[in-house]
Image (cartoon, helix red, strand yellow):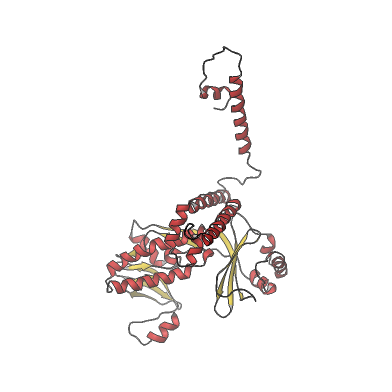
Amino acid sequence: MARCLNDRYKGSKQLELRYGHRALFVDPDSRRVFVRSAEGDELYLPYDLLIGADGVRSVVRAAMVASHRDFECHVEDIFERFKALHIDLPEGVEPDCMHVFPSCMRNMNGIGLVCTGGRINISMGHRLHAPCDEALRSEDPAVVAEYFKKNFKAIPLPYDEVAQKWVAQGWNSTTMTHCNYYHSERLQAVIMGDAAHATSPSIGMGMNHALGDAAALDQLLEKHNDHLSPVLRDFSSERVKEGNALTDVADLIQSYDGSQGLFMMIRQALRGMGHSLLPSLVAPEPYMAIGNGMKLSDAYAELVRMGRIPAVRRTNAAIKRRHFEQTTGMVPPQTRPSRGWLITAVAVAVMASGCWMLRSSSAPPTPTPVPTSVALKRFGIF
């Protein structure tokens, strides 16, 4: 994109490129942005339309927070720690698709995105409540290489190179962003890309979706003849549902609970088989349909209708909350298995035996019925 701007528009008076400048804040009253260069020079840049494609810590989004009381923005960690490896595409690995490596090692999931030049970027990480094996935390490349040789079976890897790159970097984290709209008429601004909908890389669609934002804005500018008020409103109307669907689908594609995750995988496989055999009766699996062009908002609506998104959201939210409570000291870590099931079983047994004792009593042949609440109180349940 930068090469295109330089090659086609470098001599245009409508283009001024300022590399190495950092935006610090937006002045909404004068519609200008305060920036600082790498050399420390500071200046204001005026604008007519401000496009905030400035990442998850967006200055433009911060200005919207300060300018609109009804603007809601939620930024949170994706609940994972991961490392990324940029290596040559291994022999035999398909170059024209995304590669997913679920449970590739203990507590580890991975995704591989093929790059230009015969390279692939593989990210592998673990969720915070389920740490990886200690060998992957070692600073000794030999230990890491041996662990990968023994445990990573998805595709062949240059193990020594992978180990060197693995230990040379720290554990990375990233965030998700949800906003209830993407424009501000007061600021004459829109946000897009990570500024609007930063997401987990689990489905590998963050960049595609950001380019979709740009295409949608271009189409709306042409549709409304560059009249900004309807452009800004329509941009939010079109893209907010897609951006929030993106972040939620990416975040909830897998359950943090292993048994629920296995059940979901079986359901997906059965649905896929059913659709291939009876396409007129069984709708396609939504996650697969996304790859074939289904809009993310449509896929999200179908996943909600099926009950999959609500079920995974409940499970994941509970696990996140429990992890937060324990790591902050609000609740001490559980040192032994819960005995709640045992208490429940004892209570049920007591209630059952109580009912049997009442029925088998040798008191008057037609005893007066005893209210359930009274019977339960007799046996100490209430």
Is residue 187 among what the camera can see?
Answer: no
Q: Position of residue 171 (x, y in %)?
A: 60, 64
Is residue 19 among what the camera can see?
Answer: yes
Horizontal placement of 88 versus 63: left or right? right
Q: Position of residue 346 (x, y in %)?
A: 63, 32
Instruction: Give the camera-side residue of 182 and 262.
Output: 262
- Residue drawn where x is 49% and y is 54% of the image: 309
Q: Position of residue 32 (x, y in %)?
A: 33, 72
Quarter of the rendering occupied by the C terminus: top right
Against 202, is 95 above or below? below
Q: Position of residue 364 (x, y in %)?
A: 57, 11
Instruction: Give the camera-side residue of 291 and 236.
Output: 291
The count of marks equals 0
- Residue drawn where x is 42% and y is 60% of the image: 298
Residue extending farthest bottom: 11
Instruction: Give the camera-side residue of 377 and 13.
Output: 377
- Residue drawn where x is 50% and y is 21% of the image: 371
Residue extending farthest top: 364
Instruction: Give the camera-side residue of 257 and 91.
Output: 91
Horizontal placement of 194 versus 101: left or right? left
Quarter of the rendering occupied by the N terminus: bottom left
Horizontal placement of 231 versus 310: left or right? left
Horizontal placement of 222 versus 257: left or right? left
Q: Quadrant of residue 72?
A: bottom left
